[in-house]
């Protein structure tokens, strides 16, 4: 396979053994090819492991489902990501599918660049916004090879995290401060909206201030210091990812403040912090979105169009709130001593299931902690 000649690229060939699907050698050799333009970094540089974890679970899904997967990292540089999309659009040996992210609101430009290719495109993680859709149209319209989008229900992520933090704060009216991500990334706004919606629904407590951050540990600590100095009576601090939450937790501890801190992501470091009494909770599992997209593409490739159930724009409910009571079970189910997940069980084609259900409750519930 010809590679993208780009810095920090990663080529991952993840093919399921032919015997496990009952396929012959020739059929196995025709495994559909997927390129994932990953906006993150292949090594840790202070923003946390999220995008590497997306890659990890996509590798696992590709191995289960019989895809050949190529991952190209953009190093959190959206201009580099656009150049990668341009090169991919001009590639003579086009893959079957390209998975992209609407990072820094670049999806319209990437769709235009990829329109030169025969590859079909799936958008994940950050949805294409209503304003952008006035330019791009919806899936399968102006860009007919843009066959779908798969995003977590990000407002629900914010809602569920705040619901848990409120549950842990029954004795007082919660005074809430928050750190969301950069203003150009749709998930920043959506997660914050979910938090605001829950506070309004609860009809107790109030939000004191929400600030934007850059998704990093260091910025979470800086923003936490400022917010805690400004609002010493705050009881709850939430952040739109675990890196910023862990950074803010350092600020809380430096002030000896009695503030419950919650994050989003469910990263191993956050799970350890919860187990040790640091973070109060995290809304976990966002990193599975790339794997779920491969499940949808697998069924599409084998003649069962996921759009028949819910349309081409899929908003998936699979996020799982982790707190002290269930952290050990969740950690063991997905990370510590966890066996690879067989993603065929989530596929309609492979499992003959009647409907999609990407929730991982049963996976966590059936995992032993001893």
Image: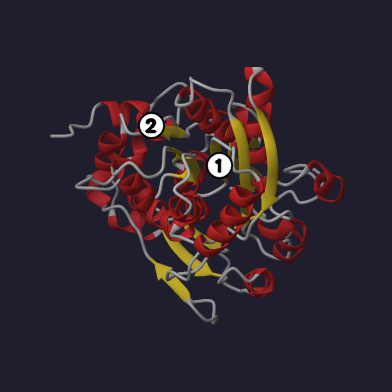
How packed is label 2: few (under 14 Cα within 10 Å), some, or many (20 or more)?
Answer: some
Q: Position of residue 146 (x, y in %)?
A: 69, 50
Q: Identify the residue shown where x is 48% and y is 27%.
A: 164
How packed is label 1: few (under 14 Cα within 10 Å), some, or many (20 or more)?
Answer: many
Q: Identify the residue shown where x is 65% and y is 37%.
A: 312
Q: Identify the residue shown where x is 61% and y is 36%.
A: 176
In the rendered image, the residue lying farthest to the right is: 134
Camera-side mark, 2 or 1: 1
State left or right for residue 37 relative to residue 83.
left
State left or right for residue 268 relative to residue 329.
right
Mark sitting on residue 204: none
The front one of 303 and 339 is 339
The secondary element bearing badge 1 is classed as: strand
Q: Position of residue 125 (x, y in %)?
A: 59, 48
Mark sitting on residue 360: 2
In the rendered image, the residue lying farthest to the left is: 370
Q: Position of residue 203 (x, y in %)?
A: 66, 17
Is any atom of residue 97 visible in this view? no
Q: Which residue is mark 1?
A: 238
The front one of 296 and 360 is 360
State left or right for residue 196 relative to residue 75.
right
Q: Position of residue 5 (x, y in %)?
A: 54, 82
Q: Are marks 2 and 1 in contact (CB under 8 Å)?
A: no
- Residue 26 lies, with reference to residue 298, above or below; the image says below
Is any atom of residue 208 visible in this view? yes
Q: What is the quadrant of the C terminus in the image? A: top left
Give the mark, 2 or 1, whose residue is nearer the N terminus.
Answer: 1
The secondary element bearing badge 2 is classed as: loop
């Amino acid at each position: 396979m010809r590679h993208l000649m780009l810095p920090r690229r990663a080529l991952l060939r993840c093919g399921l053994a032919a015997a496990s699907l009952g396929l012959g050698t020739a059929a196995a050799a025709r495994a559909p090819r997927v390129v994932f333009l990953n906006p993150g970094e292949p090594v840790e540089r202070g923003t946390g492991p999220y995008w590497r974890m997306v890659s990890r679970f996509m590798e696992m899904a590709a191995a289960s489902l019989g895809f050949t997967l190529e991952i190209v990292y953009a190093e959190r540089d959206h201009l580099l990501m656009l150049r990668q999309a341009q090169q991919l659009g001009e590639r003579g040996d086009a893959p079957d599918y390209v998975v992209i992210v609407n990072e820094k609101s670049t999806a319209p430009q990437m769709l235009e660049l990829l329109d030169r290719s025969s590859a079909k495109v799936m958008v994940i993680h950050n949805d294409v916004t209503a304003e952008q859709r006035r330019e791009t149209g919806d899936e399968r319209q102006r860009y007919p090879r843009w066959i779908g989008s798969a995003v977590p229900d990000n407002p629900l992520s914010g809602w569920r995290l705040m619901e848990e933090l409120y549950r842990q704060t029954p004795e007082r009216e919660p005074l809430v401060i928050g750190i969301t991500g950069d203003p150009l990334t749709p998930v920043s706004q959506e997660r914050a909206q979910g938090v605001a919606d829950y506070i309004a629904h609860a009809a107790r407590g109030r939000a004191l201030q929400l600030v934007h951050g850059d998704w990093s540990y260091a910025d979470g600590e800086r923003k936490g210091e400022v917010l805690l100095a400004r609002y010493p009576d705050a009881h709850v601090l939430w952040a739109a990812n675990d890196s910023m939450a862990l950074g803010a937790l350092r600020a809380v501890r430096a002030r000896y403040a009695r503030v419950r801190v919650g994050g989003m992501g469910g990263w191993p470091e956050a799970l350890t912090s919860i187990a040790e009494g640091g973070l109060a909770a995290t809304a976990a599992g966002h990193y599975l979105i790339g794997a779920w997209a491969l499940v949808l593409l697998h069924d599409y490739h084998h003649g069962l169009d996921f759009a028949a159930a819910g349309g081409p724009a899929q908003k998936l409910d699979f996020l799982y709130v982790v707190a002290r009571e269930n952290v050990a079970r969740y950690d063991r189910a997905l990370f510590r001593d966890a066996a690879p997940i067989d993603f065929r069980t989530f596929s309609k084609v492979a499992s003959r299931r009647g409907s999609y259900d990407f929730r991982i409750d049963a996976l966590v519930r059936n995992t032993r902690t001893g």
